[in-house]
Image: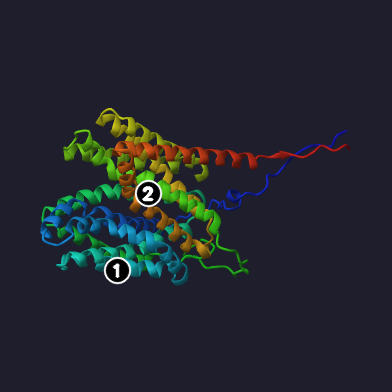
Amino acid sequence: MPASVSPLPSPPSRAVTDAQPEETVSGPGHRLRLTLLMAGACLPILGAVLIAPVLPQMQDHFADVPGVDALVPMALTIPALSLALLAPFAGVLVDRLGRTRLLVVATVVYAILGTAPLWLDSLVAIVASRALVGVAEAAIMTCCTTLLGDYYSGRQRDRYLAMQTMCASISATAFFVLGGAAGSAGWRTPFWAYAVSLLLAPAMAAFLPRPRPDGLAGEPSPVREPVTQRSFPWRPLAGTCALTVLGAVLFYTVQVEMAFLLDDMGVSDSAVIGLAGAGSSAAIVIGAFVFTRAGRRAQDWLPIAFGLCTLGFAVIWLAPDPVVLTLGAVINCLGGGIMLPSLLTLAMSRLDYADRGRGTGLWTGSFFLGQFICPLVVLALASAVGTRADALGVLALAGAAATATLGLSARRRRTDTAPRPIRQTAA
């Protein structure tokens, strides 16, 4: 009789070997620790949107300065460029100097540099101070994300990384409103908000414990076993970072170009434009919430996320009126809300404790690089094909290609990990 047949276990794959065990962290300090990390991760968002409403006032104040038309917008965007270029180096410092120490120092420096425009009278000096704010932001963002990876594991870590996206989206809306309200008292007034990080710094120093390599922060480490040396995962992380640059372009394009697209359709009422933007921001939060609640792995979410972004671009491209255009923006941002935590979770799954800071810095730099080049990409495409809407059509084609590639990759991965029957042999 033939011998009994049982399926062979599937060969170990990177996704399987990198899976983290489900270890739920709780306790009295857990919520405070999580709150501090979420607040810290929102600080770079504050720098990105807080002064946006007062840019026209700044331009009027420095109207006699040569190059004011370029320098004033740079005051808003240059921190993102600094963050993109320096986050990888911040990641190296995170691994060498320690997470919490660098985070506390960077948070204090952020307050000092962020409030510098309150007493600076030179527009060039203000732009320079904003570039240095981006340096502090690079350290803060990298430290906060790295600590989330240190303190938590498994599904809990995935949920909190998605929560980071949700908090950033909600805070962006709140900071924009705050900046507009504070700007009524003068263009310098919103810069006072940077001082809030002086309240966070001592709390971070007191309540963020030094993480342990085993991921159990604040608990005594057992006798440490010899750690096998492993090389940094350059190859898989490079692919994730390249995908992140594309994903950030697809994600930020609608947010950056929404007002211009509506204006091209004859919508000039700022209240209507703001309402459309609020709906898009809400879709990002919904997408991140869906990611936290559904039990899919990051690799399985990516084709869906890129597909939704692509569909949103296509709807905007073909939209006959502002209502349909806004619907396309909501679809795109829904995909973006799923995409960002998926990409970050995927990057984290490839990193061990020893190289988590460096890897997180590379991912953060890639994300903000995509944010910075987004308007440049749209401008170049619009000049080539004619209009902003047509430029989004080109991005829809790029997104469709990425979606197809990710879908084929996910299908191949499922095939490779499926159980394989062994060959039957006679008894």
Give the amino acid type for the residue marked by disc 1 in the picture. Val
340 sits left or right of 261 in the view: right
Q: Quadrant of the N terminus?
A: top right
Relative vertical location of residue 424 with respect to residue 218 in this rendering, above or below: above
Query: Are discs 2 and 1 less than 8 Å apart at CB?
Result: no
Residue 288: image tag = none
Q: Secondary structure at mark 2?
A: helix
Neighbor class of circle 2 (other Cα within 10 Å; few <14, some 14-19, many 20+) is many
Which residue position holds label 2? 165
Relative vertical location of residue 114 with respect to residue 17 in this rendering, above or below: below
Point out residue 286 in the picture as x, y percentages from the top left corner: 37, 40
Point out residue 383 in the picture as x, y percentages from the top left corner: 30, 43
Q: Residue at x 18, y 59 (%)?
A: 67
Which residue position holds label 1? 108
Point out residue 88 in the picture as x, y percentages from the top left corner: 43, 63
Q: Earlier in the sequence, mark 2 or mark 1?
A: 1
Neighbor class of circle 1 (other Cα within 10 Å; few <14, some 14-19, many 20+) is many
Point out residue 267 in the picture as x, y percentages from the top left corner: 19, 35
Q: Which residue sits furthest bottom?
A: 97
109 sits left or right of 409 in the view: left
Q: Residue at x 79, y 38 (%)?
A: 423
Relative vertical location of residue 359 with respect to residue 244 in this rendering, above or below: below
Q: Residue at x 35, y 40 (%)?
A: 333
Relative vertical location of residue 123 with respect to residue 157 in this rendering, above or below: below
Give the amino acid type for the residue marked by disc 2 in the picture. Thr
From where the camera sits, is residue 404 visible?
yes
Q: Secondary structure at mark 1?
A: helix
